[in-house]
Amino acid sequence: MLTKNLDGILKEFGNTMGLDLAFDGNGVCELVLADRVGIAIRASEEDGTLTISSVLRDDLPDPISYSAILDLLALALDPAQRGGNSPVVGRDDDSGMLIMYEVATPSVLNTTPLANIFADFIDTYRAVSVLLDNPTADLQPAKAEAGMIQA
């Protein structure tokens, strides 16, 4: 059961960044990272979850190394190994786009600030972006920098 409403969680997150954030009529809040990366936070009142998502690339790099594929597949298992609520990468069948997303459940939202969840998402996004820019590289964590997010 969600003890804080999703609007309140988003407002609290915005306050930590000095932004006035709100969901639109469709339950989505869109942010821009470093003037170039669109990130959506979608609220689901039915199950009390927040989904953070962003397009990584229009498609997989070609060629892509076997080790890069293994890194992406290992990332897909991360939620199972960490008990859920960690970013994963998927490919949309219709568009071919690579999308990173994370579903934050009510139990996590009640114990972990959205700012922490979002920072982990950004760190993983940046690490996967480096991997896709250099498909022979190993997946390495990257850290988000302060002041790079706009509403």
Image (tube, rainbow, N blue to C red):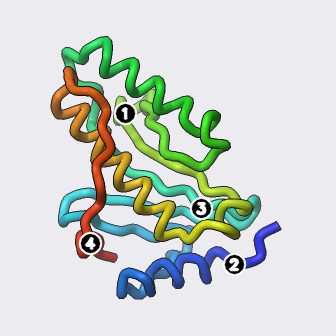
- Asked if 140 appears above or below 20 in the picture, the reply is above
Name the residue: 53% across, 83% down.
12
* Label 4 – label 2 distance at C-alpha: 26 Å
Name the residue: 77% across, 76% down.
3
Nearer to us: label 1 or label 3: 3
Q: Are marks 3 and 4 in contact (CB under 8 Å)?
A: no
Looking at numbered disc 1 in the image, what kind of residue is underneath it?
Answer: Ser
- Asked if 10 appears above or below 39 in the picture, the reply is below
User: Which numbered tag is attached to residue 5?
Assistant: 2
Nearer to us: label 1 or label 2: 2
Residue matched to label 4? 146
Seen in the image, is 24 located left or right of residue 72? right
* Label 4 – label 1 distance at C-alpha: 32 Å
* Label 1 – label 3 distance at C-alpha: 23 Å
Name the residue: 22% across, 38% down.
130
Badge 2 density bin: few <14, some 14–19, many ≥20, Cα 10 Å: some
Mark positioned earlier in the residue sequence (4 or 1)? 1
Give x and y (percent) for residue 127.
29, 42
Nearer to us: label 4 or label 2: 4
